[in-house]
Image (cartoon, rainbow, N blue to C red):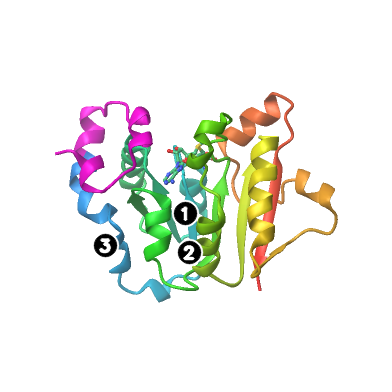
Amino acid sequence: MNYSKSLGVKKFSSSRNRPLTTKQKLVFEKNFRKLSIESFCNIKNLKRHNKKILEIGFGAGDILLNNALSNPDNLYVGIEYYKKGIAQLLLKIEKYEIKNLRLYYGDALDFVEKSNNSLFDDILIMFPDPWPKKKHWKRRFLNNKSVREISRCLKDGGGIYFYTDDRNLAVWGLRYLINDKNLLWDVQKPIDCRRNNFLYFNSKYEIKALKENKNPYYFKFTKF
Ligand SMILES: C[S@@+](CC[C@H](N)C(=O)[O-])C[C@H]1O[C@@H](n2cnc3c(N)ncnc32)[C@H](O)[C@@H]1O
């Protein structure tokens, strides 16, 4: 079955879809139905979780995995259109018998467009792909439409965390986030965005950037 096609995953993700191992294929097939937006909307007792936290583009899923293991009362939701990333994280969910982590395979904008208003306590956009070439800028997740949608599904008082080690992407994202009339840049002085607030576990991209002496940008916007 061509899962990418059946879930409407955008074409530019396919270059990333490296072949799955047998184990990964099996876990993906077993959980396929659960990876849809419809299945997420049907999760019973969404309310019983303390907080609901969404990560857009979780890659290998380290941030979600570590946070879900350390905070069993919260529900973590991850979106990814990289099939291997989904399969790798599903295997870890099985291995550690994690009950508070749900994954969605597909495009993040499709997911947020279908999500309810004021659903999430926090939304994480950690080290998204910078897509440096101009002809690829349309692939960058942050734009007017996506910011309007993530702001709508965020609770009042909730936070959008946008971290990147790419200066051009930092300026790009900041422009859209600042423009949203319901979001406030949570910062005393601009230089503070160069320091991690350690609210979430480190991403491997952050560790790599720090090793290379690149100082990432850590933006937090609060909905009011
Ligand atoms: C550079 S990785 C960062 C992974 C993770 N956030 C971290 O910090 O470790 C960015 C990921 O976002 C995913 N991604 C980018 N745009 C996406 C979209 N529109 N919908 C779903 N996933 C997306 C990519 O497939 C990629 O795995």
State the extent of the magenta-drawn residues as a range. 1-26
Instruction: Please name which of the two marks, 3 or 1, marks the residue nearer to the observer.
Output: 3
- Of the numbered discs 3 and 1, the one sitting upstream in the chain is 3
**Residue 43 sits above or below residue 10 on the image:** below
**Tag 1 residue:** 68
SS under mark 2: loop
In the image, residue 13 lies in the stretch drawn in magenta:
yes
Question: Residue at position x 32%, y 67% from top?
Answer: 41
Disc 3 within 8 angstroms of ligand 1 (CB): no
In the image, residue 201 lies in the stretch drawn in magenta:
no
**Tag 3 residue:** 39
**Tag 2 residue:** 74
User: Left or right: 16 with respect to 159?
Assistant: left
The N terminus lies in which quarter of the figure? top left
**Residue 83 sits above or below residue 53 on the image:** above
Q: Residue furthest left?
A: 1
Whole-number angstrom distance, CA of label 2 to CA of label 3: 18 Å
- Of the numbered discs 2 and 3, the one sitting upstream in the chain is 3
Instruction: Please name which of the two marks, 2 or 3, marks the residue nearer to the observer.
Output: 3
User: Left or right: 5 with respect to 92?
Assistant: left
Residue in front for this viewpoint, 9 or 66: 9
